Amino acid sequence: MGIDSLELVRERLREAGLRLTAPRRAVVTALAASERALNLQELLTTARCHHPSLSLATVYRAIELLQRLGLVRRVHLEGQRCQRYFLAPSGHWHQLVCLECGRVVEFPGGNELERLQQELEAETGFRIEGHLLQFYGYCPEHL
């Protein structure tokens, strides 16, 4: 994990009046070390390398907090109850998700999505506050 990522997490937590505790650091470090999105059990196993006494409940609370702060994103996989999580890059991004290995590739939103949002608001009267765009398929290693 780069020092910049850890410092961003530390800064966001500080702004929220919170600290980067050892369990939170272990969760963030585990997410940063993975090339794919992890489910809670995988995250617990990996994070325990950095904090052996970590519990599943602590991982869950850390993930919820990091999600609320915009530091972690959840991957929704159809047909699976178990969600996966990954560190969120700064800015607005969308995901390509491999159905085989859980690898996540991010791509930026574009003007077309902003235009679609404006059109949907005009047509429906909704005020859109956010959206989630994920494409599912198979990465090159699993074709």
Image (cartoon, grey):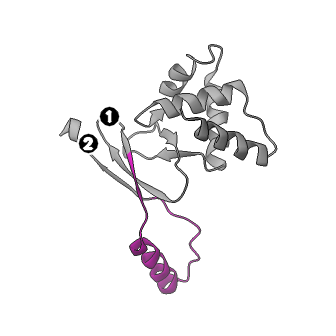
Assess whether residue 107 is covered by the magenta stretch: yes
Placement of 4 over or under 111, stated as above or below: above
Which mark is drawn over residue 139?
A: 2
Of all residues, the one furthest to the front in this rendering is 3
Q: Residues within 10 Å of mark 1 (few under 14, many from 20)?
A: some
Q: Residue at 66% of width from left, 35% of height from top? A: 62
* Residue 81, position as x, y percentages in the image: 45, 39
* Disc 1 element: loop
Q: Which residues are magenta?
A: 105-132
Placement of 135 over or under 47, stated as above or below: below
Using the image as rendered, state which of residue 89 and residue 122 is in the foreground: 89
- Residue that badge 1 annotates: 101
* Residue 95, position as x, y percentages in the image: 40, 52
- For the C terminus, which image quadrant? top left
Q: Residue at 65% of width from left, 44% of height from top? A: 8
* Disc 2 element: loop
